[in-house]
Amino acid sequence: MTNTPKFTTLGCRLNAYETEAMKELSQQAGLQNAVVVNTCAVTAEAVRKARQEIRKLRRENPDAPIIVTGCAAQTEPETFAAMEEVTQVIGNTEKMQPKTWQQIAKGPDFIGTTEKVQVDDIMSVTETAGHLIDGFGTRSRAYVQVQNGCDHRCTFCIIPYGRGNSRSVPAGVVVDQIKRLVDKGFNEVVLTGVDLTSWGADLPATPKLGDLVMRILKLVPDLPRLRISSIDSIEVDENLMQAIATESRLMPHLHLSLQHGDDLILKRMARRHLRDDAIRFTEEASRLRPDMTYGADIIAGFPTETDAHFENSLKLVKDCNLTWLHVFPYSKREGTPAARIPNQVNGTVIKDRAARLRAAGDAQVQAHLAAQVGRTHHILMENPHMGRTEQFTEVTFATPQIEGQIVTATPTGIQGAQLTV
């Protein structure tokens, strides 16, 4: 292999963002000839895939040290430390510290057996992320991490134990970074975090996400498009609703952390909203912004889920007018309260329910696409032949366009899950 470290990212967009930061930190430290695996812990399957990927990378890179980090390394370091393929395990806090990479760059003489695991207690971390990087993403879209960690304890979720409690990046720091991104020519910025709507709770005066959004749009007038990633609708504040109603530069696309459509299952998940809360939110947001589209995370087959409970999730797809579904077949995750619930749903039933949810989502996508044909859209080009509308709908172009530019066009047809021009 080449001397440049090889990075592999598993899991979420935030992991991908942090991989970019690690590349920068390792480059500054002068690290060479290493393999870094940034793992995900969201399900037991994610951990299994991480182990599989590590074994594959060892076969491909027999002489390179393998460094494992990310949420799975944080939540179960001993699992990875026990793998003969793994040289070192570092936690989610350590992976963002320059000194970690400086030490790793010193080579195997530094990494003795006692130092194989460097994973501190993530719950003791109080500082905000110091690894702001300019321009992760494509040439068209940049991602800015404004928050990390989560204070909630949903019964199915291991992530707080991988990410720690919620920490926010101060608004001034975020605004300065977005200004730099706009100066570099980015036409769209996406705000990301583990629990984005909790942004500000740990900052002086406890501002809300809506305050941050309004401040960005006011202080960075040259930013054409601002997008927010996954949010918890029950935490949405008045200023964010105001921005949805009045700010055309805030994109009309919200991804909602809903998880289920039945009140009893939501209670057993320790979610903080009920079915009617979700419906009320989408109705209000659509009233304020008629072109608003919604994505959502929904879990199929949570323990104790009956056919009737599942039907409520299925109906929620239409009741909330959801378009872009992320369907998760429930996977028992050791270390979570849900794993101890006696009535686990049969795997075949889970698979069938997940397929039915995906089919409902596919039908919603087709209805959404049909409604967009003949309407003029402002499309941000991700590559010469594909861009996305304000609602995050993919549009393909027969004629090449300039990557990173916002193109005004009227889709004339549909191909699969894309609009065509």
Image (tube, rainbow, N blue to C red):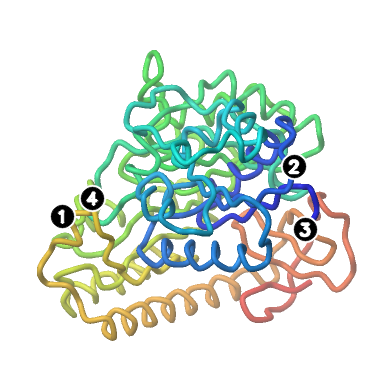
Q: Residue 403, located in which quarter of the rendered image?
A: bottom right
- The correct choice, above or below, for 233 with respect to 84 in the image is above
Q: Amino acid at mark 4?
A: Arg
> In the displayed image of the protein, which residue is found farthest to the top?
204
Q: Which mark is residue 267?
A: 1
Residue 365 visible, this orientation: yes
Mark 1 or mark 2: whose residue is earlier in sequence = 2
Name the foreground residue: 212 vs 199: 199
Q: Are marks 4 and 1 in contact (CB under 8 Å)?
A: yes
Q: Amino acid at mark 3?
A: Met
Q: Which mark is residue 271?
A: 4
- The correct choice, above or below, for 319 with respect to 414 in the image is above
For marks 1 and 2, give the one nearer the viewer: 1
For marks 3 and 1, give the one nearer the viewer: 3
Q: Residues within 10 Å of mark 3 (few under 14, many from 20)?
A: few
- Label 4, label 1: how far apart the Cα atoms are: 6 Å
| Element at label 3 | loop
Q: List x then y, in percent, for residue 192.
A: 53, 41
Name the foreground residue: 197 vs 106: 106
Q: List x then y, in percent, for residue 27.
A: 74, 36
- Label 1, label 2: how far apart the Cα atoms are: 41 Å
| Element at label 4 | loop
**Residue at 30%, 71% in the rendered image:** 300
Query: Would you name the residue on which mark 3 appears?
Result: 1
Q: Which mark is residue 187?
A: 2
Q: Amino acid at mark 2?
A: Asn
Q: List x then y, in percent, for residue 152.
A: 27, 41
- Label 3, label 4: how far apart the Cα atoms are: 47 Å
Q: Which mark is residue 44?
A: none
**Residue at 47%, 39% in the rendered image:** 92
Q: Residue 352, located in which quarter of the rendered image?
A: bottom left
